[in-house]
Image (spheres, helix red, strand yellow):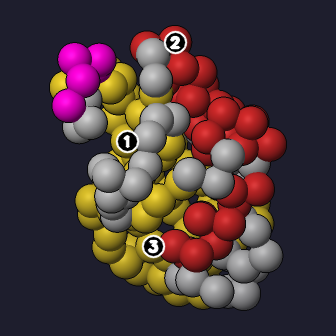
Amino acid sequence: MTFRSDLYEYLKADVGLSALVGNKIYPMFAADSEVSAPYIVYNVIFSAPVYHMEPVGTNNESVMTRVNIQFDVWGETSESAINIQAAMDAALSGFSGQMNSGTYVRRVFKRGQIDTYEASSDGTNEPEYKIMLDYEFWYNA
């Protein structure tokens, strides 16, 4: 499996997140007409190999990967979005270990968040609440 597929499976399996969003976790985009809040969309915003002179990790690799991912958390209310954001923090911030059954993650760092809202895409005047979360992952390639 790849890091991206391991991340997806890890998030879907998290009890705290699944209680709030079910299986509505989408890589790259969610079709507005087919999805209603609450849900999560995530995108890789930066990825680069990090080379080492000395082997690191469980298999003595000489390269790790650093990847920054933006998660857009959508809630029906501001409280709903905040609850999903807290569940994301619990699942990811400071995580180190095997993700799903594949990728070994050295560490996950939360880099920031922005709270916002947008007009509803369904034509109503109800706002949709969004929290944008940035996390940095370091894992063995």
Residue identifier under label 3: 65
**Residue at image location 74% in from the left, 36% down from the top:** 19
Q: Is residue 60 above or below residue 111?
A: below
Q: Nearer the viewer, residue 77 or 97?
A: 77
Please state the extent of the stretch shown in magenta in the rendering: 123-127
Residue identifier under label 1: 72
The residue type indicated by label 1 comes to Asp
Mark closer to the chain start, 1 or 2:
1
Viewer-nearest of labels 3 and 2?
2
Q: Is residue 13 above or below residue 99?
A: above
**Residue at image location 57% in from the left, 83% down from the top:** 2
* CA gap, disc 1 and disc 2: 15 Å
Residue identifier under label 2: 79
Magenta segment, prevailing SS (helix, strand or loop)? loop
**Residue at image location 68% in from the left, 66% down from the top:** 9
Viewer-nearest of labels 3 and 1?
1
The residue type indicated by label 3 comes to Thr
**Residue at image location 61% in from the left, 40% down from the top:** 21
* Position in image of residue 40 (x %, y %): 47, 46
What SS does tag 2 mark?
Answer: helix
* CA gap, disc 3 and disc 2: 34 Å
User: Badge 2: how crowded within 10 Å, few (<14), some, or many (20+)?
Assistant: few
User: Badge 1: how crowded within 10 Å, few (<14), some, or many (20+)?
Assistant: many
Residue 57 located within the stretch drawn in magenta: no
Asked if residue 41 can be seen in this view, the reply is yes
